[in-house]
Amino acid sequence: MFKSFFENFITPKDNFFGRFMLISMNKEHEKLAMWGRSYLEIKKEYTILDLGCGGGRNIEYFLTKANKVYGIDHSPTSVKMASKINMQAIKDGRCQILVGDVRNIPFLDESIDIVTAFETIYFWNDIESCFKEIYRVLKKYANKDRV
């Protein structure tokens, strides 16, 4: 039973413990996420990608700032909950949330303005490949001071 509970930290399952974990993450991570998001300059025309999107709270916030927001998580349960929270934006074509792997981001080169990952990188395997993928999808701006 304890193993089942703790596995939900890494990959939330579609059971009571997994759903509880995602609800808790949305609530408990909010203060740190607010701090991190405060450093981002988000323009309405930006496209944002949230990696390891969990329960979808950060996507919900980004949708108040940007026209297009994507989320990727390796847990189908996370994608299901994040999609439920952001259902209207998905219906409006402003949001898409996918099951995926950070080592293989399914977007074109230089197609994303901002990539975020909140409290997730310690779960990534082969972190160098993950950051290469992030660099590949990020738009390259002439003004290097932008970041």
Image (spheres, rainbow, N blue to C red):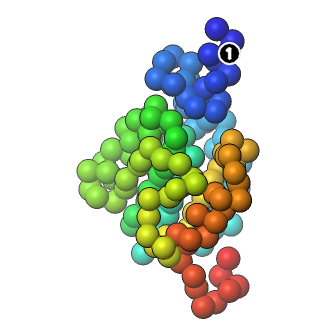
Res. 123 in view: yes
Q: Residue at x 57, y 82 (%)?
A: 140
Res. 58 in view: no
Point out residue 87 in the picture as x, y percentages from the top left corner: 33, 44
Q: Nearer the viewer, residue 142 or 74?
A: 74
Q: Is residue 133 left or right of residue 70?
A: right
Is residue 96 depicted above or below 8 in this figure?
below
Is residue 10 depicted above or below 132 in this figure?
above
Point out residue 14 in the picture as x, y percentages from the top left corner: 46, 23
Point out residue 68 in the picture as x, y percentages from the top left corner: 40, 64
Q: Which residue is mark 1?
A: 3
Q: Residue furthest left?
A: 91
Q: Residue furthest top?
A: 1
Q: Is residue 48 left or right of residue 128?
A: left
Quadrant of image for the N terminus: top right
Q: Nearer the viewer, residue 109 or 23?
A: 109
Q: Is residue 78 left or right of residue 5?
A: left
Name the amino acid type tagged 1: Lys
Toward which corner of the image does residue 30 lie, by quadrant?
Answer: top right
Q: Residue at x 32, y 51 (%)?
A: 90
Helix, strand or loop at mark 1: helix
Is residue 128 depicted above or below 32 in this figure?
below
Q: Residue furthest bottom?
A: 142
Quadrant of image for the C terminus: bottom right
Q: Nearer the viewer, residue 147 or 26?
A: 147
Point out residue 2 in the picture as x, y percentages from the top left corner: 69, 12
Q: Residue at x 68, y 46 (%)?
A: 125
Q: Residue at x 70, y 54 (%)?
A: 127
